[in-house]
Image (cartoon, helix red, strand yellow):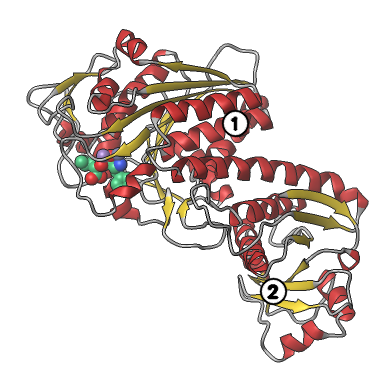
Amino acid sequence: MEIKTVVSDIDKIKAGAIIVNFFEEMKHLDGDIATVDKALDGAISQLISQGEIKGKLNEITIIHSQGKLPADRVAVAGLGKQPELTQDKVRGAVAETCRQLRQKGVDSVATAAQGAGIAGISLETAVQAVTEGVLLGTYTFRRHITKVAEHGEMKQFLIVTSHKTELSSLEKGCYKGRILAEATNLARDMVNEPANYMTPGHMADTATKLAETHGLEISVLEREQMQELGMGALLGVTQGSRQPPKFIILRYQGSHSAEIDMALVGKGITFDAGGISIKPSEKMEEMKGDMAGGAAVIAAMGALAQLKPKINAMAAIPCAENLPDSKAIKPGDILAAINGKTIEIISTDAEGRLILADALGYANKLGAKLMVDVATLTGACRAALGTVCSGVFGNNQGLVDKTIAAGAEAGELIWQMPMFEQYKEQNKSDVADIKNVGGRYGGAITAAQFLAEFVGDTPWVHLDIAGTSLSDKEQNYLVKGATGVPVRTLVNLALSLAQEEKGR
Ligand code: BES
Ligand code: MN
Ligand code: ZN
């Protein structure tokens, strides 16, 4: 899809459709919608007075212009009540509108910066939201479908202003929105890809390609190097699989210092059958997406390489399959992680925290100043928070707050979970330093407390995305399948941390 910013009046644009906005409780028409209504001889105001257009959020009305405008159609998109508008509602409405237009065979669309100047939304932010909306909302994953789609492709999307002075803001917002959305869609592609394609090796290849495209440093550790480093927990998990494990390390250097300002760690289990503690078969296919944390971290690094904040970031993605086999680890086995701590395996299905232990320990050993890990870690987190928000856990309230704020800006909701040290009791083992399951209750929290054993004193947050990495329906800018959460949160967080560094 080509996305362009142009200086023109919206009623002069030739396209399959132009989008104009209407708000609930709007008394009279002004701006673009008034101009377009006039050109259509009052067709819009008539629909409003007849109560067919109410301006409710995501209410979309498509009107044919019958030669009264250069554009073939006008889509009137409701944005709800003006004072309640958010950039996330703009993202969603643009997505819904573009999908409906695509369904009707429209392949070129033009819009103004929807929401700019309303409820504190800046022009640049509005354009960013519009850009993310169209790219995220029209995302499809059809690689393995041989039949051609019923709908065509959206080919061209124009963001229009009639003021030449606004063009640079339009371009900035469009640039950032495109990078964020494309990174999110890359993560979605990786998560949607089945496990027979998206193996640990393929994850490494994808990261390598991304690194070559955008100029990131990359190294991929093989089994032998994992052994040298003492990554006994990761090596334990991979034992039952024929796919060689990979430990992907990406580096983005945005400042001259040698320090790692931020380490991103992502769970890269390319399929989680549970191992010897095998999962029930119902919905097991969803476990092809158990590398969503790793995919998000890889994609976020690609976005950083393009947005170039003045910060150094490293990503560590341990990749492995978790399968049952005669060589697989067993409940009762004891593994030693990179920091020397020994772990009693209670369930081989609690594998995510094992590979993360080595990855967090690795980043910590390198002296990372701050760490963020992302993982589809526990069914318990999904049970607690549902599919609406991710859980965040941490040892540093400032960093937790910044992570939640970065998520809010992205429309990726995050809720903080408790880290009372009483929960640690549940992870105590009789035969090793710690065990990998802390019993039935508070499972998302005991998992986070397990990870805390491998981060030392480094400021750290853990995002549990088990409930948010997949969507079971098309909704706003989400489509069925992978959501790409929390790519945009991670990028926003890195940008805000870089901003802070600058202020110092
Ligand atoms: N990958 C799963 C968690 C998960 C569950 C992600 C549902 C997405 C949707 C993880 O490896 C796992 O199996 N966790 C176990 C932990 C238990 C054995 C302590 C779980 O949540 O049941
Ligand atoms: Mn598991
Ligand atoms: Zn898992």
Residue position for label 2: 23
Residue depicted at 84% across the width and 80% down the height: 66
Q: Is residue 369 left or right of residue 225?
A: right
Q: Nearer the viewer, residue 503 or 125?
A: 125
26 is higher (above) or lower (below) than 406: below
* Sequence-earlier tag: 2 or 1: 2
Residue tagged by mark 1? 302
Can residue 504 be seen from the camera position used here?
no
**In terms of secondary structure, where does tag 1 sit?**
helix
In the image, is residue 497 above or below residue 339?
below
Could you tell me the amino acid type at mark 2? Phe
Is the distance from the Cβ of mark 1 to the nearest ligand 3 atom less than 8 Å? Answer: no
Quadrant of the drawing holding the C terminus = top right
Q: Position of residue 215 (x, y in %)?
A: 64, 22
Residue at 45% across, 14% down? 367
Question: What is the number of the mark on residue 462?
Answer: none
Q: How many marks?
A: 2
Q: Residue at x 45, y 46 (%)?
A: 192
